[in-house]
Amino acid sequence: MIKNNLLIIVLAGVIISGCKAIAAPADGIRPWTENPWYWQYKGEPVMLLGASSDDNLFQWPAERLVPHLDSMKSAGANYVRNVMSDRVDRGFELYPFKSTEGGMYDLNQWNEDYWQRFEFFLEETASRDIIVQIEVWDRFDYTRENWPSHPYNPKNNINYSAEETGLDAEYPDHPGQNKQPFFFTTPNQKNNEVLLKYQQQFVEKMLSYTLNHNHVLYCMDNETSGEAEWGAYWARFIKDLAEQKNKKVYLTEMWDAWDLKSEEHKRTFDHPELYDFCDISQNNHQRDQAHWDNFQWVKDYISSQPRPINTVKTYGADGGSHGNTNNGIDSWWRHVTGGVASARFHRPPSGLGLSELSMNSVRAAREIEKVCPYWELTPNNELLSDREENEAYLTTKAGEVYVVFFPDEGEVGLDLSEYDEDFTLKWMNVRKGEWASEELIEGAGLVNLKTPGGQEWVAVLVKK
């Protein structure tokens, strides 16, 4: 396979790029060699499920972080989002740069407390086998209320002026308008060498910690609407630095568009040589059947070169601005049932965070995983009859296991006519995270499945 004039050969866990061999650690996080739709870690396939209450947990003091990670672990969660964000608006966050005696920042000197927190976070997640998905840049850090005090703002550092960088003192518009020159510095954009130097130093410093670990994935941006070359530049930059350390890393980009069929998302889907997995978190702005259909469209679109599909933030919580609690639970389960490699509940107030409901969903999913691992299942709604739109969703290991998710009270038929076997039917109460009932049913026909009550349920049928 030839991509960008580089010959890439994958053999026995080693990637050979040009003439240089790059190690892909057998115990590190990477696409599973037997089924690349999913991840493997420490040599075994793994389903990444997450629920955490902040986007930048590394900023948390140890006395707050450790209990949070322990609670995640106890529920079966093994996946966190970590934006390298430094919005100092809650009293405990830190900037990565050192402040001089005059109150100005020196971008050539580091705030070691910031980086010590980062290393502590990496060590604590690694010790619990919790996979970290890092987002390197977050557009919200560099606009509106977060920009006036930021070290990169020329009025706050001793390293450059507004004239040298083209950076203004304020950017009051929503970052989705992409007016901030911070995101146009790369050689194929504005080639702003003055500012790019400091951006590069930051990424190099971050990698000096992360490349010592094997449980880290990389995403270039948080829901960017920027130019394709911005993310592509940083993807190549990170891969090149990792290669110099004889390390293979896996990365993606997260686009802002809510429509997964948009040209933005195809910048990732169409370039597996650059982006090793996909993040479709913005699909969680969709609802009901469209939410499922759009995700299945992506799986079909990239089926010739399958890769893990992650959803690092699932929106939806009562009182939030992106859907209610029902939306959050339903979206998370539709993605899990539909074949994602990872699913995480977004932080409050836009998601359920690490809460009783989110932890119970993780517990429920882990119980079902004990019956049959998700990587052995294939979505197949065609076996359901008398199904209304968004009523039920099926994934199956044909003839052996059938898992049906109901977003609410419902009743459908399941076609077992090809299998003259007895099956055990168990119902999982999603909101309680526990099995509710069990019965023996006969196959060789159409089986009626009716939820025991309202709200979310999962029916699990297993051949006796």
Image (cartoon, helix red, strand yellow):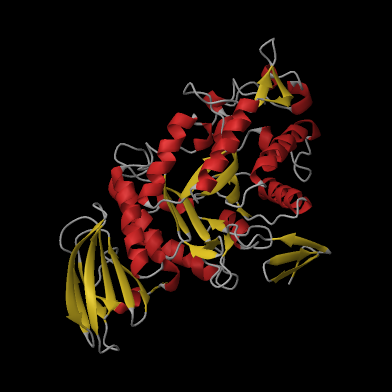
Q: Residue at x 54, y 63 (%)?
A: 40
Image position of 379 (left or right of 270)? left
Q: Nearer the viewer, residue 51 or 157?
A: 51
Q: In which quarter of the image is the N terminus?
A: bottom right
In this rendering, the answer to whether 432 lies above or below 11 is above
Q: Hey, which residue is sitting farthest top in the picture? A: 102
What is the quadrant of residue 355 in the picture? Answer: top left
Image position, residue 417 (x, y; %): 26, 87
367 or 101, nearer to the observer: 367
Q: Is 454 placed above or below 307 here? A: above
Q: Can residue 209 be seen in this view?
A: yes
Side of 22 where 84 appears, left or right = left
Q: Position of residue 107 (x, y in %)?
A: 72, 25
- The quadrant holding residue 142 is top right
Residue drawn 74% across the image and 38% down it: 200
User: Is 109 rendered above or below residue 336?
Assistant: above
Left or right of 432 on screen, residue 17: right
Whole-percent x, y for residue 257 in the image? 51, 50
Whether residue 56 can be seen here: no
Q: In which quarter of the image is the C terminus?
A: bottom left
Residue plotted at (60% across, 49% down): 218
Seen from this angle, which residue lies furthest front?
127
Percent x, y of residue 112: 65, 27
Residue placed at 56% from the left, 67% from the top?
Answer: 32
